Image (cartoon, grey):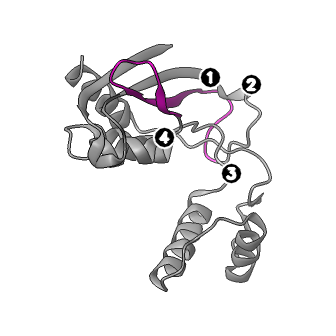
């Protein structure tokens, strides 16, 4: 297991609605699991391989670390505050796609269809609010509720992480070391 702690620069939090200066911290954990022992459905991963797993947690603290403004899955807030800092957008993009990559509730095709559906709603000026039953009905309508034998949301899938993603995370963590 490898763990990386990225301490982001201290910045003025007032433009973002905070009272004073804030500082972000990202904690990244890369581990390996034996795919045969996972409680997931492995459509594309042979049962004999080790699967790298990724977990990212973020925190935003006030200037004196006396109060936590955000903690946990605050990728959106980290992106909002640190979006113009080198490497942060790349980390946030990786976080959004690969965090907890052994607990993915949909195939890649189902993911793309749900994303397209949500974007279509937002293009019509409405706010998209995820609804599992609605997504199931939409996928049934387009013929992908069951994709390669997997029913949407019925168990966890594994999303393998390309090697270049790990290189990007490690490079970014060194930038802020």
For the residue pair 76 and 34, the one nearer the viewer reads as 76
Residue for badge 1: 33
Q: Is residue 66 magenta?
A: yes
Residue for badge 4: 74
- Mark 3: give few (<14), some (14-19) or many (20+) Cα within 10 Å: many
**Label 4 residue SS:** loop
Residue span colored magenta? 44-71
**In terms of image quadrants, where is residue 40?**
top right
Q: Is residue 4 shown left or right of residue 142?
A: left
Above or below, comparing residue 137 to residue 72 in the picture = below
Closest to the camera, between mark 2 and mark 4, is 4
Residue for badge 2: 37
For the residue pair 122 and 102, the one nearer the viewer reads as 122
Residue for badge 3: 105
Q: Is residue 65 shown left or right of residue 50?
A: left
State yes or no: discs 3 and 1 in contact (Cβ < 8 Å): no
- The image shows residue 143 at horizontal and vertical percentages of 71, 78
Q: Which of the marked residues, 3 or 1, is nearer the chain's N terminus? A: 1
State yes or no: discs 2 and 3 in contact (Cβ < 8 Å): no
**In terms of image quadrants, where is residue 49?**
top right
**Label 2 residue SS:** helix
- The image shows residue 78 at horizontal and vertical percentages of 38, 41
Closest to the camera, between mark 2 and mark 3, is 3
Q: CA distance from mark 3 to mark 1?
A: 18 Å
State yes or no: discs 1 and 4 in contact (Cβ < 8 Å): no
For the residue pair 117 and 83, the one nearer the viewer reads as 83
Q: Is residue 94 shown left or right of residue 22?
A: right
**Label 3 residue SS:** loop
- The residue shown at (56%, 58%) is 108
Quadrant occupied by the C terminus: top left
Q: Which of the marked residues, 2 or 3, is nearer the chain's N terminus? A: 2
State yes or no: discs 2 and 4 in contact (Cβ < 8 Å): no
């Amino acid at each position: 297991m490898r763990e990386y702690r990225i301490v982001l620069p201290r910045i003025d939090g007032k433009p973002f609605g905070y009272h004073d200066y804030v500082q972000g911290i990202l904690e990244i954990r890369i581990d390996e699991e034996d795919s045969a022992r996972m409680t997931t459905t492995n459509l594309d991963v042979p049962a004999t391989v080790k699967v790298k797993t990724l977990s990212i947690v973020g925190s935003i603290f006030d200037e004196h670390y006396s109060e936590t403004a955000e903690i946990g899955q605050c990728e959106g807030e980290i992106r909002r505050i640190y979006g113009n800092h080198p490497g942060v957008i790349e980390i946030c993009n990786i976080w959004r796609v690969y965090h907890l990559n052994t607990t993915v509730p949909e195939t890649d095709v189902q993911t793309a269809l749900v994303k397209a559906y949500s974007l279509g709603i937002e293009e019509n000026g409405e706010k998209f609010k995820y609804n599992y039953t609605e997504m199931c009905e939409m996928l049934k309508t387009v013929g992908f509720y069951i994709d390669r034998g997997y029913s949407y949301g019925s168990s966890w899938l594994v999303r393998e992480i390309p090697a270049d993603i790990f290189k990007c995370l490690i490079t970014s963590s060194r930038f802020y070391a």
